């Protein structure tokens, strides 16, 4: 029987989760047409009834050579104007607005060559994590807050939310997560071009997943701050409160185990074994009453980091997922991340 505080937190979480009224249950789609646009691995746009097998094979081949899967052509058109960095995403889609990557630049006066790429949560607006970026400045760290694919200014006009980044379209979700991870690496290129040598990544919720994938494939990342953690992308979607409407579309189409396999290519669990031997220091943040990144899945990440003896610190929040953004938990969370970055970057 949950205690009084747990019941209070659950009510608060659900109240915050039901504020939005623009969630849309979209039809299930395999999305092989999205995967067919990638040069590697090969995937036919029309799978002729074999979509399940095609995506299974696609995920296996991508995992077998993930360096190639997350490879990209260097960006040539970085442009910084009035604190906004704009560049052509190395991953192109049918949506012109999404093809332009955007990031807000917050330089600290005396950063000593230290900078973090910052990724907000799923469905974050253009102001997401701007306050955190400014707080990092006060700790002597410059921040480049990137807008992920299909978010804010990159959102297609026919959508009200960032549904194209995480939805019941399996192939599009893979494509979008790959695009965001590659855009992060392009941001790292820009920081290096400006002379930054002590570089890290900070991500929250969906941003945490994208940040981990980018960090696992880029040796330049020396610090990783992962705010809400889960081994598998699919487990969050399948069991989380904030994605329950996405989960509805999978009913009768795929099982949780199958979806875990299909989306393994965009899941932190697939890349943890790339980290042993690297000096990257990680901060793992989880919430005891998280209704989206369920604690059982967060503990799996903590256990694996310990088993692999990866250098890390753990910070536990006594709240839930949505309530992380509420006072005093948002202040606790922000200060913990900034202090970690200041110590280790």
Image (cartoon, rainbow, N blue to C red):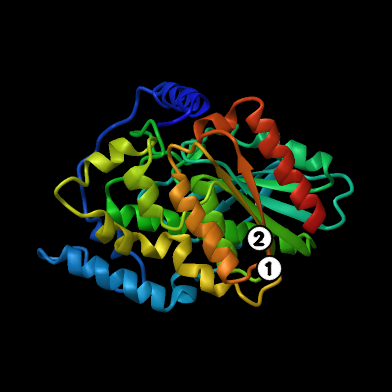
Above or below 107: residue 124: above
How many discs mark residues in the rendered view? 2
Q: Nearer the viewer, residue 140 or 226?
A: 226
Residue 93 in view (yes/no): no
Above or below 224: residue 63: below
Above or below 157: residue 305: below
In the rendering, at what x and y percent does residue 167 appear? 32, 45
Q: Nearer the viewer, residue 76 or 273?
A: 273
Q: Nearer the viewer, residue 254 or 69?
A: 254
Q: Nearer the viewer, residue 332 or 169?
A: 332
Residue 219 in view (yes/no): yes
Quarter placement of the N terminus: top left
| Pointers 1 and 2 in contact (C-beta within 8 Å) | yes
Quarter placement of the C terminus: bottom right
Q: Which residue is mark 2?
A: 188
Q: Residue 220: give its label.
A: 1
Q: Judge left or right: residue 161 versus residue 306.
A: left
Local packing at callout 1 (Cα closer than 10 Å; few below 14, some 14-19, many 20+) is some
Q: Judge left or right: residue 261 versus residue 8.
A: left
In the rendering, at what x and y percent does residue 64 appear? 40, 78
Identified at 78% across, 58% down, the residue is 344
In the rendering, at what x and y percent does residue 329 appear? 64, 31
Identified at 27% across, 46% down, the residue is 168
Residue lying farthest to the left in this orientation = 49
């Amino acid at each position: 029987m949950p205690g009084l505080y747990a019941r209070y937190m659950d009510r608060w979480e659900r109240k915050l989760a039901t504020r939005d009224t623009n969630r849309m249950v979209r039809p299930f789609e395999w999305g092989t047409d999205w995967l067919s646009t990638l040069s590697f691995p090969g995937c036919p746009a029309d799978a002729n009834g074999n979509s399940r097998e095609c995506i299974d094979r696609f995920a296996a081949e991508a995992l077998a050579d993930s360096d190639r899967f997350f490879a990209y052509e260097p960006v040539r058109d970085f442009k910084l104007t009035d604190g906004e960095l704009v560049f052509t995403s190395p991953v192109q889609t049918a949506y012109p607005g999404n093809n332009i990557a955007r990031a807000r630049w917050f330089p600290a006066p005396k950063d000593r060559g230290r900078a973090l790429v910052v990724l907000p949560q799923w469905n974050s607006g253009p102001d997401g994590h701007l306050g955190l970026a400014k707080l990092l400045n006060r700790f002597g760290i410059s921040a480049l807050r990137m807008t992920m694919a299909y978010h804010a200014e990159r959102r297609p006009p026919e959508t009200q939310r960032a549904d194209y980044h995480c939805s019941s379209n399996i192939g599009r979700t893979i494509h979008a997560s790959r695009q965001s991870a590659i855009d992060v690496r392009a941001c790292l290129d820009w920081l290096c071009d400006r002379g930054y040598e002590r570089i890290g990544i900070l991500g929250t919720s969906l941003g945490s997943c994208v940040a981990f994938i980018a960090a696992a494939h880029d040796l330049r990342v020396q610090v990783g701050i992962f705010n809400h953690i889960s081994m598998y992308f699919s487990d969050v979607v399948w069991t989380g409160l904030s994605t329950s409407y996405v989960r509805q579309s999978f009913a009768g189409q795929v099982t949780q185990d199958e979806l875990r396999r299909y989306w393994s290519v965009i899941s932190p669990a697939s890349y943890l074994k790339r980290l042993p031997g690297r000096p990257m220091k990680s901060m793992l943040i989880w919430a005891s009453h998280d209704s989206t990144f369920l604690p059982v899945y967060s503990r799996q990440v903590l256990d694996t980091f310990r088993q692999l003896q990866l250098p890390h610190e753990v910070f536990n929040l006594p709240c839930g997922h949505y309530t992380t953004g509420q006072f005093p938990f948002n202040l606790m969370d922000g200060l913990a991340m900034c202090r970690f970055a200041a110590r280790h970057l």
